[in-house]
Image (cartoon, rainbow, N blue to C red):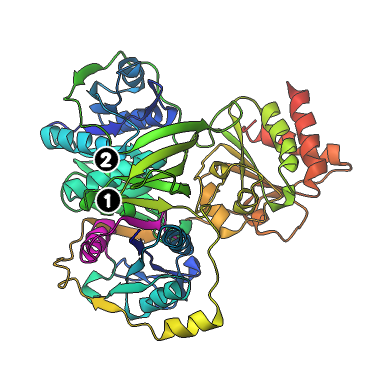
């Protein structure tokens, strides 16, 4: 039997998400044969996008792709027919829910929120952070088809040199029990936190939603792959939308550059940003714990320093 | 509305948890507290029960000390608690935990809604609530930030967080939801309610009572402490702009700009 990895391909308005495509490319690095699974009313651009990213096949299940129970039913049926080596799912809100349901249906093991996957001799091994990032565990599934939710924030962008994938249309799934009444995208254009290569994050010292404008100006100067995030206190206070929170209870990000502005560096926040390659800390308090994990530190008032950085970045272009 | 709430006990400080030679996590030295997001789950349940009438029953899985979770929940509005306590379930993975909790919910009779925290403070797999939903064959919405009991009886309107925004989802009852910390602010107990909760008696069940044979679905190969980042360079300049220029030059030199 040839190894095959299944990847759940989430899509929005007919277009696969960047995180799903990045995961397909990652799966292709591990395995010759990658099959994407798309649960959506229409196939849209999936065959081209998934093929370019490295999938050889797209299993299209015509159904409401926003309902986790339908995704789980579709994946379970496909796993039963094709016995893949493992099922990889982006560790998103919907992906986490669908993967948990698939695992319960299959009675197999779930490796959740993993940051690295290896495949050797048909056995999938994953690295996941435990206890809020204070430990790293290498683990594998004992029996049955492993289901993994994978952090996509640290993955390189999807490949683009493959030809279109072959499409196999599965039977339509039952109507969803839940109904999406309204979708409210996060305000502002630009890249999502998970896909950003540069994250400019603000904490309690921002003082209010107006304070975040200096961070937005810096992110704009840094280019289209920069995004603004926040620590828990700033999101708690309602200064930014809750989906911008980075930390143990929020998003996990792994950008090339992380600028922590007015963030003290509580362990809960560090757990969400620990995958960042280069960290810059800007804080008034020279004793702030964030400096212990920063590659570059600046002590001072962020409302003076951040605009100066914006000016310096703009001057480079 | 009759509601079951799933709450667990977690270490207050994750750094105090020890890793044993058997590659399991030893929480004996870690001070145990009620999972913070579990308090949000309970508060959501109590608010819904207050608005619609009904009961709130808390279920927890854990060693003898986990009874403290049930007491705390009763002190802030739950009517009853079920404690699943069984040494054979120590260190259970998400699926075994979900099987236990689903079986315990199944014993409660007619339940309209199950509420849990979206992501526990220690485990953080965000998997158990959806697994419970699957095992009970119920619909679910996870990562809920707002609940509206709305005008339609037998349904809830939930707002959930996504990577690229929010969505509002209509959910028929009975069903399962998981809530995050933004859904509400948990209330505090009064001295009187704490004293009353101390007298509460809880049903205690074992895996055998629930017909569950503990099974391990995943194996840990090793557990390590992630490498500690070394503190880097402090950048200073004659003026704020000079400092900023030096920082940007250093970042360019490091290849990240």
**What's the residue at 32%, 70% (across, down)?**
B21
The answer to which of B96 and A252 lies nearer the viewer is B96
The local secondary structure at tag 2 comes to helix
**What's the residue at 39%, 62% (across, down)?**
B53
The answer to which of B206 and A215 lies nearer the viewer is B206
Chain letter, disc 1 residue:
B
Task: Report the span colored magenta.
Answer: B92-121
Residue B177 is situated, as x and y percent measured from the top left of the image, at: 37, 51
Compared to residue A31, the image places residue A91 above or below, namely: below
- Residue designated by label 1: B133
Q: Residues within 10 Å of mark 1 (few under 14, many from 20)?
A: many
Chain letter, disc 2 residue:
A
Horizontal side, residue B20 vs residue B14: left or right:
left
Q: Say which quarter of the image contains residue A50.
A: top left
Compared to residue B9, the image places residue B228 above or below, namely: above
Q: Are marks 1 and 2 in contact (CB under 8 Å)?
A: yes
Q: Is residue A89 magenta?
A: no
- Residue designated by label 2: A69
Q: Residues within 10 Å of mark 2 (few under 14, many from 20)?
A: many
For marks 1 and 2, give the CA distance: 9 Å
Q: Say which quarter of the image contains residue A135.
A: bottom left
Q: Say which quarter of the image contains residue B119.
A: bottom left
């Amino acid at each position: 039997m040839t190894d095959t990895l299944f990847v759940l391909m989430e899509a929005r308005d007919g277009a696969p998400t960047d995180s799903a495509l990045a995961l397909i490319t990652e799966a292709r690095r591990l395995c010759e044969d990658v099959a994407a699974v798309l649960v959506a009313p229409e196939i849209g651009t999936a065959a081209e996008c998934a093929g370019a990213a490295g999938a050889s096949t797209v299993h299209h299940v015509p159904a409401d792709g926003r309902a986790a129970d339908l995704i789980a039913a579709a994946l379970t049926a496909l796993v039963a027919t094709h016995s893949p080596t493992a099922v990889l799912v982006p560790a998103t809100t919907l992906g986490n829910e669908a993967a948990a349901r698939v695992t319960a249906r299959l009675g197999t093991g779930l490796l959740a929120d993993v940051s690295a996957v290896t495949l050797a001799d048909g056995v999938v091994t994953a690295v996941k952070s435990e206890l809020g990032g204070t430990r790293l565990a290498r683990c594998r599934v004992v029996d049955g088809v492993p289901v993994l939710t994978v952090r996509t924030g640290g993955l390189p962008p999807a490949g683009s040199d493959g030809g279109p994938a072959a499409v196999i249309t599965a039977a339509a799934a039952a109507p969803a029990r839940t109904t999406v009444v309204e979708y409210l995208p996060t305000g502002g254009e630009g890249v999502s936190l998970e896909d950003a290569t540069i994250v400019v994050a603000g904490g309690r010292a921002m003082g209010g939603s107006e304070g975040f404008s200096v961070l937005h100006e810096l992110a704009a100067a840094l280019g289209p792959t920069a995004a603004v995030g926040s620590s828990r206190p700033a999101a708690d206070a309602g200064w930014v939308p809750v989906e911008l929170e980075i930390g143990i209870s929020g998003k996990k990000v792994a950008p090339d550059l992380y600028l922590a502005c007015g963030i003290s560096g509580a362990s809960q926040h560090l757990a969400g940003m620990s995958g960042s390659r280069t960290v810059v800390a800007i804080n008034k308090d020279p004793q702030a714990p964030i400096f212990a994990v920063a590659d570059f530190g600046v002590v001072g008032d962020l409302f003076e320093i951040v605009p100066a950085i914006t000016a310096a970045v703009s001057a480079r272009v | 509305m009759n509601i079951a709430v799933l709450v667990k006990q977690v270490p207050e400080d994750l750094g105090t948890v020890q890793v044993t030679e058997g590659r399991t996590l030893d929480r004996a030295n870690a001070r145990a507290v009620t999972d913070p997001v579990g308090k949000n789950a309970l508060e959501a349940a109590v608010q819904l029960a207050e608005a619609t009438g009904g009961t709130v029953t808390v279920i927890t899985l854990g060693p003898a000390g986990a009874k403290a979770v049930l007491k705390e929940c009763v002190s802030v509005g739950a009517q009853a608690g079920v404690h699943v306590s069984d040494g054979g379930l120590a260190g259970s993975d998400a699926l075994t935990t979900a099987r236990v909790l689903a079986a315990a919910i199944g014993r409660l009779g007619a339940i309209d809604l199950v509420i849990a925290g979206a992501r526990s403070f220690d485990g953080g797999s965000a998997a158990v609530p959806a697994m419970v939903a699957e095992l009970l064959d119920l619909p679910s919405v996870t990562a809920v930030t707002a609940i509206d009991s709305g005008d339609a009886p037998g349904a809830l309107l939930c707002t959930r967080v996504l990577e690229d925004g929010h969505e509002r989802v209509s959910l028929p009852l009975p069903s399962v939801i998981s809530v995050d910390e933004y859904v509400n602010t948990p209330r505090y107990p009064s001295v009187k309610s704490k004293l009353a909760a101390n007298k509460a008696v809880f049903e205690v069940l074992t895996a055998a009572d629930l017909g569950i044979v503990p099974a391990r679905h995943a194996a840990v190969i090793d557990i390590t402490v992630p490498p500690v980042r070394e503190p880097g360079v402090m950048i200073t300049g004659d003026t704020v702009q000079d400092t900023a220029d030096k920082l940007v030059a250093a970042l360019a030199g490091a290849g990240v700009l």
